Image (cartoon, rainbow, N blue to C red):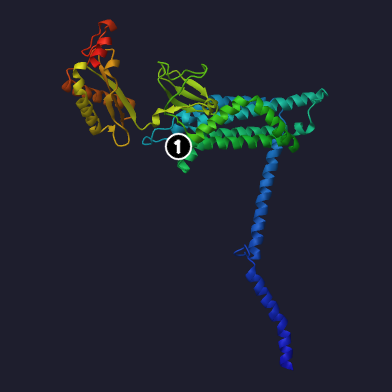
Amino acid sequence: MNANAARARKAPVVAAAAAAASQSSQSFSPNLFSLPPSASEAIDSASKRALVGVKGFLEKCDENINDPWHAEDVWLIFVWHWLSDEKRRKAFHAFLQNTLKPDDEPPTPFEESYWHFVHGPMKVIFALWVTLYMFDNLAWIGRLLELSVGLPQIFVNQFDRGMYALAAGCIAGLSANEYFPRVLRSKFGVTNTSTELLLTRFAMGVITFTTVLVAALLFGLPPKSLLGFGGIGGLTFGLAAKDLISNYLGGVMLAVMKPFSPGEKVYLMPVNGRFRGTNEPDVGGYLVKEIGWYQTTLIPKDTRPTTVPNGFFLGSSVINISRQTQRVIGGELRVRYDDAECIPRLTEEIAEYLRNHPDIESNSRPIRVHMRTLMKDASDGSLRVRIECHCNVVKKDAFLKTQQAIFMDIWAIQKRLTTGPAWPVLVSPSDYNPPWGTGAAAGAAGR
């Protein structure tokens, strides 16, 4: 009796333990480990103190941002302008004199230093302060004269915050444009200029979009208005600025597809007189100097910079001669009629010479040496032997020297096997009497 009662009391406990074990085996907790309660409370307390400190700092910054400019504060603007224009170069040289030692490497030029770059952000801050100074003082004058400014109160209250957001976005864009390519090269090993340009433009686009969105919200523009502008306003802007968008997209496509890069040489054809074509004698192809946001700068043979809108490349063919792997060598030999029987041996020896030449590609490219004309078509008094092959030398100066040496060797072969080249013979059809006859006499002889 007592044993049965004990088993009855243990049964619910065992069942609960089994159910808990079954539930724990079927469920998975993402917390691999749990901190002690004291440690969790300490982390929460430290995070709260840090967030409170950040909040207090942001509130102090916001109070200073909204502090109005007074008429007597104009001296600060003049001092900032004087520092940005006059003292940067002097500070740069003074810094070098105080820090460089005689054994140190040559310093970075001023134009590539931070002291030169900082001029852009300082100009942005100068423009920001001038705008805020004029706005605050005009608003003060309006209040004294009891004039209505006609602006929404939320815009007046948020004007300083919006302007500071725009200025911060401009400085961030300048910094990204200057230093982001260097980070890509040094930290991520990006060496291709087109990839570097694409990533930099993407970063600039993100910064620009974020700056405009944040500034619009700070100025008090409702989110619904932003969505409306993104629809109808965006369509209107796209239609009005289609050329700008086309050129921008052209620049993006150049960075993605990489048909050419700065430093390479390309051939272009003229389109409705928009720029000079490669077929003009003074052009001779273009050297790509810079691929910009809106246009690409090309340098022709006469060194006159030519700018082409990037949108042009969306629908035009570009020949990139810097990426060619071989050059074509082609020409004709003029052989006299009296040396016609020498042509088979002449073509065979020239072809053999070209196949054995170290600079001629004979495995993947054909070598063609053969007579192209019949005697009845050779009205200038000669037979033509056409030569065509591919040279592995692609650099122009080296190719011209190689081509000249090959031509001289071919000339030596012709001189050895024939009586010399055929010179032009100027005769009228009535005076031309070949050995096989002409006209009716030739027909009678044939019959």
Q: Residue furthest right?
A: 146
Which residue is depicted at the point 62% across and 27% down? 126
| Left or right: 143, with 39 as reference point | right
* Quarter containing the C terminus: top left
* Quarter containing the N terminus: bottom right
Residue 219: percent from left, percent from top: 72, 33
Q: Nearer the viewer, residue 278 or 158?
A: 278
Which residue is depicted at the point 60% across and 25% down? 243
Q: Residues within 10 Å of mark 1 (few under 14, many from 20)?
A: few
Residue highlighted by disc 1: 192
Residue 284 picture quarter: top left
Q: Nearer the viewer, residue 390 or 418?
A: 418
Residue 111: percent from left, percent from top: 47, 28
Q: In this picture, is 24 found above or below 183?
A: below
State whether residue 73 appears in this view.
Answer: no
Secondary element under disc 1, as helix, strand or loop, is loop
Residue 26 picture quarter: bottom right
